[in-house]
Amino acid sequence: MANSGMQGVKELRYYVMLALYFPILLYAFSTFDLDEDTYAVQGIEPVVVGETTVVLGQPFKGRAFLAVSGGQGQELNGAGDLEALGDSVFQMATGGVLAPGESEKVVPYSGSFKFQQVGGAEAEIPVSGSFKVRRPDIVAMSESMQALYRSSKNDVRIEVPGLEDRQLKLQVGKSTVEGRSLTLAPDGESASVRVFLEDGENGDVYLGEKQFTVIDPPRPELEVANAGRKINNGDNLPRARAILEFDVVADQEFRRRYPADARYRIARATVYLRKGLTASKKVGTYDLDGNKLVLTRALREAKPGDRVMIELEGISRINYAGRAIPVQLSGSSRTFGFVIS
């Protein structure tokens, strides 16, 4: 009974192994193109494991070996650009496979196995196949993610999936940066980064180009205070303390991510005074000192109930490089009116 049970276990193990390896053997034989010659060998077990698609610049590698029972070993040979590494690995460089306008391409390859048959005669079995080379995806990461802010310090990192361990070169205009990080401060409507795979032996491989849309930073808001108290349009303004402090408030998220680019300045203000029911008259244009406007002298002839209007001009954003970039705001958003008290 014990022997019968053991025999059953062995048969079960045999069928399990057959189910596991039979599809592999069928696949392996279908992978090779064999000629019509018959080879006197006791057993052949071809196995192939290789990539079907590789990223441009990434070498194609296929592990291919032929176990020959009763023979004297094997020799692996590649044809053309296919290189044999030892007796089990094919490798082919892909850096020059795609032309600048191509996004992907099927690359055929061929090689052969040489081995000694039983009795000492040498035999050769050809092997061939193909793989696809595609241009890689270029992924850019920045603070704004979707676009770059105009005339601002945009720190960008470029990643190429599949080539994480390879050295890159990034080209913007005539400037080249080694690595994956660079700073972009575009002034136009778009910007682009050309990405290369560094290859000192065969020349750098052009991987592709990453395009960015360029947008203006979010518009700021204007606030005004008198004697440390925030006031709004239509509020009273004491004639004896007619000192106004203006503040250009940056978008909160933009200021958090781009603090060096979220500073603002107001150059000047034009003041108008309306007495009673008469038409408004221009009092003068004044340069602002630290965004502060002192009107005690300009309004010395004003009476309670008169109205003063201030129109701010020359609003600019000071970017990370100290450059003043004009900020376009509507006339209503940069105009304030108060009642003299």
Image (cartoon, rainbow, N blue to C red):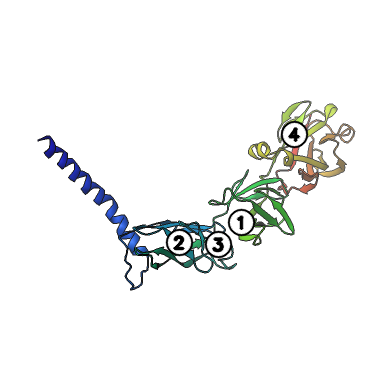
Secondary element at image label 1: strand
Q: Badge 1 is on which residue?
A: 210
Q: Are marks 4 and 2 in contact (CB under 8 Å)?
A: no
Question: In the drawing, does residue 134 fall left or right of residue 39?
Answer: right
> How far apart, in angstroms, are the residues tagged by discs 1 and 2?
44 Å
Label at residue 75 = 2
Q: Residue type at mark 4?
A: Val
x, y (%) of residue 166?
A: 60, 51
Residue 33: x %, y % from top left: 37, 68
Q: Is residue 166 left or right of residue 310?
A: left
Nearer the observer, disc 1 or disc 2?
2
Q: Which mark is residue 224?
A: 4
C-beta proximity under 8 Å, tags 3 and 1: no
Q: Nearer the viewer, mark 4 or mark 1?
A: 1
Residue nearer the viewer, 341 or 185: 185
Q: Amino acid at mark 1?
A: Lys
Q: Quadrant of residue 301?
A: top right
Residue annotated with mark 3: 94
Q: CA distance from mark 4 to mark 2?
A: 85 Å
